[in-house]
Amino acid sequence: MRRLALGLALIVLACGVAHAQPTPLLPSQIFPGPVEDEPPDIELITFGVGDLIFEKFGHAAICLRYHNPAYVPVCFNYGATNFHAGSILIWRFLRSEQVFWVEPEALDSIVGFYTYEDRDIWVQTLPLDATQKRAIEAKLWSDYEEKNRFYVYDHFYDNCTTRIRDIIDNATLGKLRGNTSESYPLTFRQLGARGLASAEPLVALTDFVVGRQTDEHPTVWEAMFHPEVLRHEVTKRYRVEPKLIYKRNGPEFPHEGGTGRWLFLVLILVFTLPLVIARWKERFTRAALAWAVLYPGTWGLLIWILVVLSSIPGMRWNEAVLVLVPFDLALPFLGETRRRKYARVRVMMLLAISALCAIGVLHQPLWIPILTAIVPLAVVGFWK
C-alpha cells in the first residue's frame, strides 16, 4: 500500500483511513445477537494519528464487552476495504464509488495492532442503560449481516467514525446530536491541515487539488466525522472522560505548523528563472519558455482532469480551475505576437481572480496557484 502514497496524496482529504487493518475475527469467534441475560458494556475506542499519510486523521471503533470471559470482546471496525486494489482504489475514491464494510475484530487484536503502530488509544465506556446497550448490540450485529454490511465511503459525511456517531446517537434518542447545529470553529480544510501539520508540503498541495467545499465550516455534528471531535463531544455530552490505555512512544505530532508553501515558491523560481535569463541573454528563449510553462501547465492539466473525472464535491468544485489551465502548455508553439497577447490576457484574468479572492467571492487559498501562473506569464507578456 505504501506504493500508492503519491497517488493518494493527491486525494489526501478523501482517504483518511489506515493503510492496513487488524485481523478480523474467525467465524468460530463470531456469535451474533444477545448471548447473555445482561447486556454487554459499550466502549468507544478512538485512535490517534500515525506516521503514514493514511494515518493522519485517526480512527475509531465501537466495541461490545461481554461479561462472560468465554465470549471474546468484539470491536466493530467500519473502516475495512480492499487497500491493495492499486489504481482501482484511487479511481473509485475519485468517483465516490469505493465500497467499505464493517469488520468484527477482537478487542485485543485491534488494541495490539494500533499499539504496534505506536498510536494513542483512548477508551470511553458509555454510560448507557440496558435498553440502549441492547439497541447498539443489535445494530452492530445487524450491520454485520451481508445485506447491511457494505456502504460507499465519503471522508466527510459517511466514514468509519460517522457510522459510530449515528449508532450512538440513535440508541440514545438524539443525545449526541442535540444542540450541534452551530458551526464548528474550524473549516473542513483546517481540520485536514491539523492532521497534515507534520507533512507541510501536503498542506500546500491541497491549495491546488482540494476545492471550495472544504472551506466551509461544518456544524459540530458534521465535524464529528473526525475521531478527535467525536471523542470530545462524547466526553461533553455523556460525561465520560476518555481513558488513555496506550500513549505513543514516538514524538508528538504537531496540530499546527508551517504550510510548506515556501517549497512551491521555490519551484516557481526554478521554472521561471531560466526564462528570465534567456530573455536577458536573448538565447534559448523557446526552450526556456517551454520549461517555464511546463510547471503551471501541468498543474492545469492535472486539476482539469480531476475536476472532470472526480465526483467528490470537495475536488470537483475547485476554484483553482480558473487559475491554472492546460492551454499554457501551447505557449512555446505560438508566434511572438500571439504569445505575448495570450500571456497579457491571462495576467489580466489572474489579477481579476485575485480581486475576487480579496473581496471574498472566491474562498479557496489561491495565492500560491495564482503566483504559479502569473509569474512566468508576466515575463512572457511584458518583458520585451
Image (cartoon, helix red, strand yellow):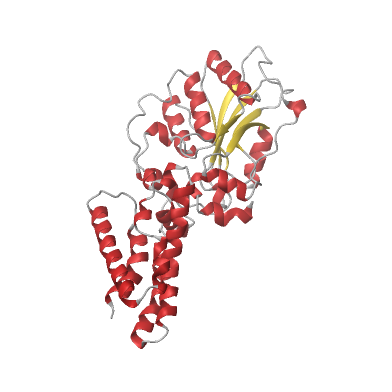
Q: Position of residue 318 (x, y in %)?
A: 39, 49
Please give the name of the residue rendered at 65% of the width and 46% of the height, measured from the top-left corner: 85
Quadrant position of residue 236 = top left
> So how many labels did they put on this image?
0
Q: In the picture provided, is 257 more to the left or to the right than 244?
A: left
Residue 261 higher or lower than 103, as above or below: below
Q: Is residue 99 visible?
A: yes
Q: Position of residue 376 (x, y in %)?
A: 35, 71
Please give the name of the residue rendered at 28% of the width and 70% of the height, measured from the top-left corner: 341
Residue nearer the viewer, 384 or 111: 384
Please give the name of the residue rendered at 60% of the width and 28% of the height, measured from the top-left corner: 63
Q: In the picture provided, is 125 more to the left or to the right than 358?
A: right
Q: Residue furthest top?
A: 37
Q: Is residue 197 visible?
A: no
Q: Report the quarter where the C terminus lies.
A: bottom left
Q: Position of residue 14 (x, y in %)?
A: 50, 45
Residue 266 higher or lower than 193, as above or below: below
Residue nearer the viewer, 217 or 240: 217
Residue 248 higher or lower than 179, as above or below: below
